[in-house]
Image (cartoon, rainbow, N blue to C red):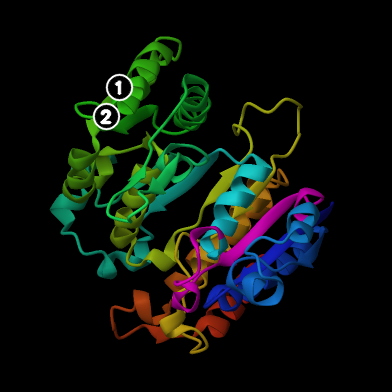
Amino acid sequence: MNGKIAFIPGDGIGPEVAAPAAAVLDAAGALFGHVFHRAELPAGGRAVDETGVPLPPETLEEAKRCDAVFLGAVGGPKWDDLPVNLRPERALLDIRRELGVFVNLRPVSLAAPLRSVCPLKDEILSAGGPGGKPVFDFLIVRELTGGIYFGARGRSEDGSSAWDTESYSRPEIERVLEAAYAAAAERRKKVCVVDKANVLESSRLWRETALRMSGSCPGIETSFLYVDNAAMQLIRAPGSFDVIVTSNMFGDILSDEASALTGSIGMLPSASLAGVPGRRPGPARPLMGIYEPIHGSAPDIAGKDIANPLGAVLSAAMMLRYSFGLEKEAAAVEAAVNSVLEKGYRTADISGRGGKERLAGTREMGEAVVQALEEQA
C-alpha cells in the first residue's frame, strides 16, 4: 500500500512528539510492506508567523489531497494577544470543519505497567469493571464540528458582556450516536449518553434523540448521566464505562479528566473521522481522519526532550486502523508501545520512580518503540 499523509508538526512540543510518530509509521511500513509519503505542512502558530494566518489555503488544499492528517499540537502564549480568528487554535476548528471530521474517538485505558502512576486505589479501579479486576478500558465519542465551539459568539459594543451559543441539530446528534452504537457493538455493548438535560435545551434534544435511536439498537444498554455526575463517576468507578458519547465541549473536558487516570495526558491518542467506523460505504473504503494526541503544545517543556511521545505514536496506530484499514499493523504498533512500557521505559510524566524504571527522553522513547516494532519481524 502507498499512502499520503498531511503531516503538521505544529508548535511547542508538537514537532518533538510528531517525529517519533513518523518514525514508527516508517518502521511499520517497512515491516509490513507499505510506503507512507508525508507532506509536511504549516498550521497553527508556525503558520501565523510564516503566512499571517493559522490555516493557509495551501495547507488545507494539500490536506484534502491526502489520505489522512497527522497533527502534533498547536498554540502557545506567544500568540495569545492575537484576534480570535488569527490565533493558532483556529486552525484546528477550521481544518476539522473543512475536512468534515465530525466524530472524535478517544480511547482511555490503563496500561498494566503504569498501575503505579494511576492515582486511584485498586478497590476504586475494580468498581464496575469486568471480573472485579483493577482495570478500565472505555471510549469517549465526542461530537466535533458543532456545539458551543462552532456556535454564534460575540461581545457587546462596550465589551461588558459576551456570549457563546450551544446549538445542535438532530442530524448532527444522530451521526455521532451512530458512531457510539457502532463502537459499543464491537466492545461491551454499553453506551452512556452524557448531557445536561436538566438545564440545557440542546441537551434535551441529545437525550430525546438517543432514546429514539436506542430502540433500534437491540442488545446494547443505553444509560444517561448529567455531565457533573459523569465527571464524578469517572473517578469513582471508571471500570463501569464502555462507550461515553457526548457533545463537543463536554467531550473535550471529560477526556482531559480521564487522561489523569492513565497516568498522564501524554498517553492518550485521538482520531477525528469523517464517517462512522464499521459503517463504511464501500467494503474497504478508508475514512479521512485527523490524528493527534489530546495534549496541547506545552511550550514550557518544548525543546527539553522530556515530552511523552506515546500519545502521538498511538494516534499513528489509530491512523493505520481507520484511514488505511490496516488492523494488523495498528495492533503491532500498540503491542510495541506496551512492550516498551513493560521493559520499564518511562518519560518523566509517567515515572513512578520505581527501581526497574528507565527514565527516557522523547527521542529515546520513540526509538525504543521503533526497536520493539522491528523485533516483531
Most foreground residue, 187 or 361 = 361
Mark seen at residue 204: 1
Which percent across, then down, holds residue 373?
Answer: 64, 68
Residue 77 in magenta stretch: yes
Q: Which residue is mark 2?
A: 200
Disc 1 residue type?
A: Arg
Q: Residue at x 45, y 67 (%)?
A: 296
Which residue corresponds to the image point at 47% horizontal and 20% vertical from the top-left?
A: 170
Q: Secondary structure at mark 1?
A: helix
Q: Are marks 1 and 2 in contact (CB under 8 Å)?
A: yes
- Distance, label 1 to label 2, CA atoms, is 6 Å
Please provide percent x and percent y for residue 337. Answer: 52, 66
Task: Tell me the quarter of the image containing the C terminus.
Answer: bottom right
Q: For numbered disc 2, what is the local secondary structure? A: loop
Residue at left offset 53%, top offset 65%: 87
Name the spot of residue 157 as percent of width and height, x first.
37, 51
The answer to which image quadrant residue 59 occupies is bottom right
Q: Which mark is residue 288?
A: none
Q: Is residue 87 left or right of residue 260?
A: right
User: The magenta stretch spans which residues?
Assistant: 63-85
Residue lying furthest front: 158
Could you tell me which residue is drawn at 71 percent across and 71 percent down? Answer: 51
Quadrant of the image occupied by residue 4: bottom right
Q: Is residue 211 left or right of residue 100?
A: left
Q: Is residue 370 visible?
A: no
Whether 366 is drawn above or below 191: the answer is below
- In this image, 8 relative to 311: left or right? right
**In the foreground, 71 or 11:** 11
Q: Residues within 10 Å of mark 2 (few under 14, many from 20)?
A: few
Number of numbered discs overlaid on the protein picture: 2
Residue 279 vertical placement versus 28 (above, below): above
